[in-house]
């Protein structure tokens, strides 16, 4: 069932309109966003669609094709609405907290973005609802400000300590481009990423290993980075230059913290190097940077799991130019840069490797850079 059909079934009327926002794949730049560094995501064709219609002021009702029943709420405070509906209530709260009058609304949601896969289904949900409420209420909220507001809904209301990347990608990406985002200034640059013209493709491999941000591991990584920045006397780890990394590491006594810092500093540089290569049209040349990013996430940031490590190795063995886990870690997806005509071969290699390891079979598909949130 799609969002419009669900709206008609639950609310007995036609929606005012449909708004959609995509999930995202992060090409490179993991756990750099909350360290005020650089990221390079692109939007997926898979989207969350919100069918939305008006309701009395101060009243919101939401339902989803993935959930039973409906959930209604009025003005709330963080933590008051729980489960999946918290993402919707969080957007309403964040709008109100920023001084906007969020219009009452009935909302029906349908999503193509796999939940728990590291493709940011939560940001797609937040961004579709936020875009709908802005349009429905005629709110004067510039697109540059919208990602931070959606992030605040997730950070403060839901309690997930995510950075700004996911919401920025879901709202600001363009089709056929990767979004180079400075997570300190929020400045963006649209980077050409025409894979088909080069005979290339990005194969996304959903490891089907559980993935969850609202747990201790993600928060622990963020806390460690913030503590390290404090010890080093810099506003954020983004301010540690690559040529100053060795000196910075000498100032840290904790070996785990040293590894975390090394990942962030080197990952920021890998993003910059990837952007430079793409701007030169050297798409294949980014492969080694992707693979180096994965090694850093595995060894220094310690956020991979056996399923994603096996997927990366299998893809590389099948001829991928580069491969890495994408997303916050502890499960989720792998992306592999491959020749477009090698998708079936690469998929088969990963499936065979999973079979030998006794893992649940992965799900694979080609990702084409899509557009950000908009009314349909």
Image: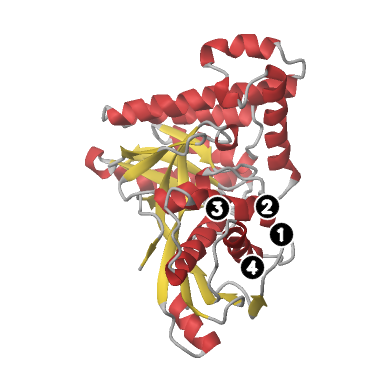
Residue located beneath label 2 in the image = 156
Pointers 1 and 4 in contact (CB under 8 A)? no
* Residue assigned mark 1: 78
Give the secondary structure at mark 1.
Answer: loop
Q: Quadrant of the C terminus?
A: bottom left
Residue sitting at 34 percent across and 26 percent down? Answer: 276
Q: Are marks 3 and 4 in contact (CB under 8 Å)?
A: no
Neighbours of disc 4 within 10 Å: few (<14), some (14-19), many (20+): many
From where the camera sits, is residue 237 visible?
A: yes
Residue denoted by label 3: 149
Residue 341 in picture, x, y percent from top left: 29, 44
Tell me: 290 left or right of 61: left
Specify the label residue 85 is tagged with: 4
Q: CA distance from mark 1 to mark 3?
A: 14 Å
- Which residue is rendered at x = 39% and y = 41% of the image? 179
Q: Are marks 4 and 2 in contact (CB under 8 Å)?
A: no
Please indicate whether residue 222 sits to the left or right of residue 126 in the image: right
Query: In this orientation, which residue lies closer to the viewer: 70 or 284?
Result: 70
Instruction: Tell me whether the residue at label 1 lies in contact with that at label 3, contact meaning CB atoms closer than 8 angstroms.
Output: no
- Mark 1 and mark 2: span between their CA atoms? 6 Å
Residues under numbered marks 1 and 2 in contact, where contact means CB atoms less than 8 Å apart = yes
276 over 143 or under it: above or below: above
Image coordinates of residue 86 in percent, x first then y, are: 66, 64
């Amino acid at each position: 069932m799609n969002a419009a059909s669900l709206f008609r079934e639950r609310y007995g009327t036609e929606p005012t309109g449909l708004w959609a926002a995509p999930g995202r794949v992060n090409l490179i730049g993991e756990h750099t966003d909350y360290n005020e560094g650089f990221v390079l995501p692109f939007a997926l064709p898979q989207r969350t669609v919100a069918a939305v219609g008006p309701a009395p002021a101060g009243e919101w009702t939401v339902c989803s094709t993935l959930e039973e029943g409906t959930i209604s709420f009025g003005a709330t405070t963080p933590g008051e609405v729980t489960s999946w509906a918290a993402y919707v209530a969080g957007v309403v709260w964040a709008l109100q907290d920023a001084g906007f009058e969020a219009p009452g609304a009935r909302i029906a949601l349908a999503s193509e973005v796999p939940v728990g896969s590291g493709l940011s289904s939560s940001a797609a949900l937040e961004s579709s609802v936020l875009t709908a409420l802005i349009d429905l209420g005629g709110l004067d909220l510039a697109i540059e400000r919208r990602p931070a507001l959606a992030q605040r809904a997730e950070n403060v209301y839901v309690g997930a300590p995510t950075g700004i990347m996911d919401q920025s990608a879901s709202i600001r990406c363009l089709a056929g481009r990767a979004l180079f985002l400075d997570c300190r200034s929020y400045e963006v640059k649209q980077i050409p990423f025409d894979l088909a013209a080069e005979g290339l493709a990005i194969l996304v491999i959903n490891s089907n290993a559980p993935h969850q941000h609202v747990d201790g591991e993600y928060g622990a990584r963020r806390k460690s980075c913030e503590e390290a920045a404090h010890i080093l006397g810099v506003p954020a780890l983004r301010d540690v230059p690559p040529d100053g990394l060795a000196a910075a590491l000498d100032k840290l006594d904790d070996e785990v913290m040293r590894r975390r810092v090394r990942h962030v500093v080197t990952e920021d540089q890998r993003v910059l190097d990837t952007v430079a290569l793409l701007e030169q049209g050297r798409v294949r040349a980014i492969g080694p940077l992707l693979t180096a990013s994965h090694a850093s996430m595995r060894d220094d940031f310690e956020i991979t799991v056996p399923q994603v490590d096996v997927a990366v190795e299998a893809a590389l063995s099948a001829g991928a130019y580069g491969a890495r886990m994408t997303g916050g870690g502890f499960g989720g997806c792998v992306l592999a840069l491959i020749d477009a005509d090698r998708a079936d071969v690469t998929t088969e290699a990963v499936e065979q490797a999973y079979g030998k390891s006794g893992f649940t079979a992965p799900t694979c598909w080609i990702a084409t850079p899509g557009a950000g949130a908009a009314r349909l």
